[in-house]
Image (cartoon, rainbow, N blue to C red):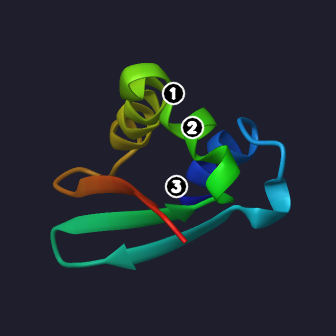
């Protein structure tokens, strides 16, 4: 799933070398912290947050049963 998040974000930005995805897992949830270059944040968020919402929806649909998946953007 981490590869999916990374692939989706890298396909949106120009500076792919600045994309990093960190995975943190608890007993009932998985958190993906995505960081991109500050100039690229708007592309990942999209108008009214539509792009990041779509990414979250895709990742949640791939989640294992009983796990809650969160995708958060981290500003550097």
Which picture quadrant has residue 73?
bottom left
Q: Look at discs 2 and 3 and give the one toward the viewer.
A: 2
* Residue position marked by numbered label 1 in the rendering: 46
* Residue position marked by numbered label 2 in the rendering: 42
Marks 2 and 3, how far apart at CA: 23 Å
Q: Residue at x 84, y 63 (%)?
A: 17
Marks 3 and 1, how far apart at CA: 21 Å
Q: Position of residue 39 (x, y in %)?
A: 68, 49
Which picture quadrant has residue 31?
bottom left
Q: Could you classify mark 1 by the number of other residues whose Cα lies within 10 Å: few (under 14), some (14-19), or many (20 or more)?
A: some
Front residue (pair 40, 12): 40
**Quick check: 36 above or below 42?**
below
Mark 3 or mark 1: which comes first in sequence? 3
Marks 2 and 1, how far apart at CA: 6 Å
Label 1 near label 3: C-beta < 8 Å?
A: no
Q: Position of residue 47 (x, y in %)?
A: 46, 21
Q: Secondary structure at mark 3?
A: loop
Label 3 near label 2: C-beta < 8 Å?
A: no
* Residue position marked by numbered label 3 in the rendering: 1
């Amino acid at each position: 799933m981490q590869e999916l998040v990374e692939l989706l974000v890298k396909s949106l930005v120009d500076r792919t070398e600045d994309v990093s995805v960190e995975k943190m897992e608890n007993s009932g949830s998985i958190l993906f912290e995505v960081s991109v270059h500050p100039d690229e944040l708007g592309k990942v968020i999209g108008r009214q947050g539509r792009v990041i919402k779509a990414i979250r929806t895709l990742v949640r649909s791939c989640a294992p049963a009983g796990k809650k998946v969160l995708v958060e953007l981290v500003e550097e």
